[in-house]
Amino acid sequence: QNADALKLPSRLQAWLYDQRTSLARGGLALHRVHMLDESGVGWRAPNQTETYSHKMNVLASYKEEHGHCFVPMSYSLSTPEGKHVRLGEWCAEQRKMHRRALLKPSRW
């Protein structure tokens, strides 16, 4: 289960958020990852891989339509599935993480 669904105290939810952030940036020690996984608390962000894949698909559609991936920061859209995607902000964040060597090589 996701930590938010368990109605954990706000301080614990904030701490778990910090752990997710550290994991995403590659700064969470492996033994801590295992301890959190074994705790039974759904501490990982829900469906990160699915969300990333979805946004990559939206970016591919953008490229097909515009001929490039230089998405303006303010660009956002609603998908046919009803999801609101802030594609420009997401692309800017991916570029920033790549420059800082924080983006997983599998996501280059």
Image (spheres, rainbow, N blue to C red):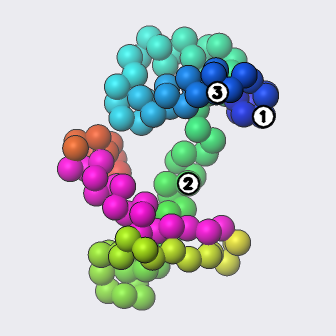
Residue 85 location in percent, x, y? 55, 67
Q: Nearer the viewer, residue 17 or 42?
A: 17
Res. 5 mark: 1
Residue 25 location in percent, x, y? 36, 35
Q: Is residue 6 left or right of residue 34?
A: right
Label 2 neighbour load within 10 Å: few <14, some 14-19, many 20+: few
Considering only vertical position in the picture, is 98 above or below 32? Answer: below
Amino acid at circle 1 = Ala
* Residue occupied by mark 2: 51
Q: Residue at x 54, y 62 (%)?
A: 54
> Marks 2 and 3, how far apart in space?
21 Å
Mark 3 and mark 1 residues within 8 Å of each other at the beta carbon: no
Considering only vertical position in the picture, is 32 above or below 71? Answer: above
Q: Quadrant of residue 15?
A: top right
Q: Which residues are magenta?
A: 83-99
First in sequence, mark 1 or 2: give its number. 1
Amino acid at circle 2 = Thr
Amino acid at circle 3 = Gln
* Residue occupied by mark 3: 13
Mark 1 and mark 2 residues within 8 Å of each other at the beta carbon: no
Q: Which structural element holds mark 1?
A: helix
Q: Is residue 74 left or right of residue 70?
A: right
Considering only vertical position in the picture, is 43 above or below 66? Answer: above
Residue 89 location in percent, x, y? 42, 63
